[in-house]
Amino acid sequence: MGNNKILGAFGENMAREYLSKCGYRVLEKNFSCRAGEIDIIAIQGDAVVFIEVKTRSSDRYGLPSEAVSKSKQQKIVKTALYYMQKNKLLDKMCRFDVMEIIVDGEGSNRINIITDAFQYSGRYGY
């Protein structure tokens, strides 16, 4: 497994632990279908939360969240809609969060949750 995959898996594990401590209930990790993949699906309050986790070793080249492009957002939305339909959750509120994790290798990792990082406003529109 390459270093980026190892770093990404480490970040996702760290994200799940952090989310649990913050009151989220994790339903799925690495959910995938033909439309795409979602790192973490959780419940917080009465909302289904679809979370994209971006882990970097530094912010030298920008913030991790900047890597969540419009096309990535569209894939997440399509995958989320499939998940909600498949699990009969269409009557629930949902939101799309991005978690930034910066692992510096010296134990002072930074975690930032961007709540409502992007919106879905109708048939794949933004």
Image: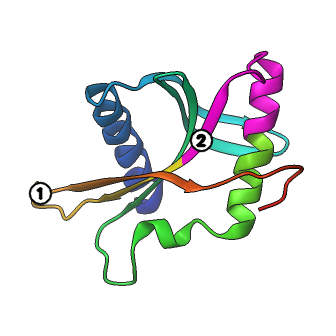
| Figure coloring | rainbow
Q: Earlier in the sequence, mark 1 or mark 2?
A: 2
x and y percentages locating residue 43 in the rendered image? 51, 24
Whole-angstrom CA distance, mark 1 to mark 2, is 29 Å
Q: Could you tell me the amino acid type at mark 2?
A: Arg
x and y percentages locating residue 15 in the rendered image? 36, 41
Q: As displayed, is residue 60 above or below residue 69?
A: below
Q: In the displayed structure, does residue 48 sit left or right of residue 64?
A: right
Q: In the displayed structure, does residue 26 sit left or right of residue 126?
A: left
SS type, badge 1: loop
Q: Quadrant of residue 103?
A: bottom left
Q: Quadrant of residue 19?
A: top left
Q: Residues within 10 Å of mark 1 (few under 14, many from 20)?
A: few
x and y percentages locating residue 17 in the rendered image? 30, 31
Which quarter of the rendering shows the C terminus? bottom right
- Residue that label 2 marks: 95
SS type, badge 2: strand
Residue at left 42%, top 45%?
Answer: 9
Where does the magenta region start and end?
80-96
